[in-house]
Image (tube, rainbow, N blue to C red):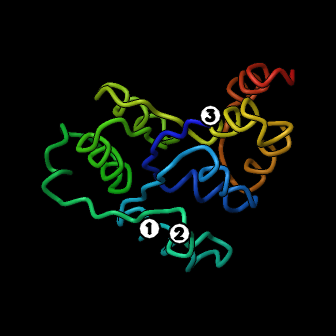
């Protein structure tokens, strides 16, 4: 499989990790970059939920520094520091896929010319490439862990997976 590099925000690792499928990212993308700011968000999450994935323990994740100057070059926005660092890193490096789930962050990244994939997109790609047999059980599992999906998006995802 021709893998594309990915720079990811918190949600992909958080929710895929909580259902035991974080390795899908390594199977689909190489390398997988994680800004230091995002690694810190996951560390904070482990204080609240010890089952939160520790990206520093994953051999396939490269934690990268994103200088404040790169983040400061972004147009004015109301995104969180993790989302900003992902977008800034992707803009500073060519051909990176951006892993974001927040609608506002996704729109900002797309307007900046970046290609975006979210948790649902990862599940759909994993099914298309034969890494998983079905999207619905994993989509239900991430929802059970707190991942929010509108009923319309849920139906669309299942249609795209040919599971409707």
- CB atoms of marks 3 and 2 within 8 Å: no
Left/right placement of residue 152 relative to residue 116 reads right
SS type, badge 1? helix
**Residue 102 x, y percent position in the rendering:** 49, 41
SS type, badge 2? helix
Q: Which residue is mark 3?
A: 121
Q: Earlier in the sequence, mark 2 or mark 1?
A: 1
Q: Give the CA separation, mark 2 to mark 1.
A: 7 Å
Disc 3: CA contacts within 10 A as few (<14), some (14-19) or many (>=20): some
Left/right placement of residue 16 relative to residue 108 reads right
User: Closer to the camera, 101 or 5?
Assistant: 5
- CB atoms of marks 2 and 1 within 8 Å: yes
Q: Which residue is mark 2?
A: 55
How many labels, in total? Answer: 3
Q: Earlier in the sequence, mark 3 or mark 2?
A: 2
**Residue 26 x, y percent position in the rendering:** 60, 53
Disc 1: CA contacts within 10 A as few (<14), some (14-19) or many (>=20): many
Disc 2: CA contacts within 10 A as few (<14), some (14-19) or many (>=20): many
Task: State the image quarter where residue 59 is shown.
Answer: bottom right
**Residue 6 x, y percent position in the rendering:** 46, 45
Residue at point 72%, 27% (across, down): 157
Q: Is residue 77 above or below residue 164?
A: below
Q: Earlier in the sequence, mark 3 or mark 1?
A: 1
User: Closer to the camera, 55 or 130?
Assistant: 130
Task: State the image quarter where residue 112 is shown.
Answer: top left
Q: Is residue 58 above or below residue 116?
A: below
Q: Which residue is mark 1?
A: 39
Left/right placement of residue 130 relative to residue 39 reads right
Residue at point 62%, 42% (across, down): 119
SS type, badge 3? helix
């Amino acid at each position: 499989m021709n893998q594309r590099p990915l720079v990811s925000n918190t949600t992909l690792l958080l929710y895929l990790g909580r259902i035991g499928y974080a390795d899908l990212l390594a199977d689909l993308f190489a390398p997988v970059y994680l800004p230091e700011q995002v690694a810190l968000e996951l560390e904070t999450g482990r204080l609240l939920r010890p089952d939160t994935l520790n990206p520093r323990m994953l051999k396939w994740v490269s934690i990268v520094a994103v200088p404040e100057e790169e983040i400061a070059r972004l147009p004015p926005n109301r995104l969180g520091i993790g989302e900003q660092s992902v977008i800034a890193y992707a803009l500073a490096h060519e051909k990176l896929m951006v892993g974001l789930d927040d609608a506002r962050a996704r729109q900002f990244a797309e307007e900046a010319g970046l290609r975006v994939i979210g948790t649902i997109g990862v599940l759909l790609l994993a099914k298309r490439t034969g890494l998983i047999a079905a999207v619905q059980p994993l989509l239900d599992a991430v929802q059970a862990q707190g991942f929010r999906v509108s009923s319309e998006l849920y139906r669309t995802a299942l249609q795209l997976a040919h599971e409707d």
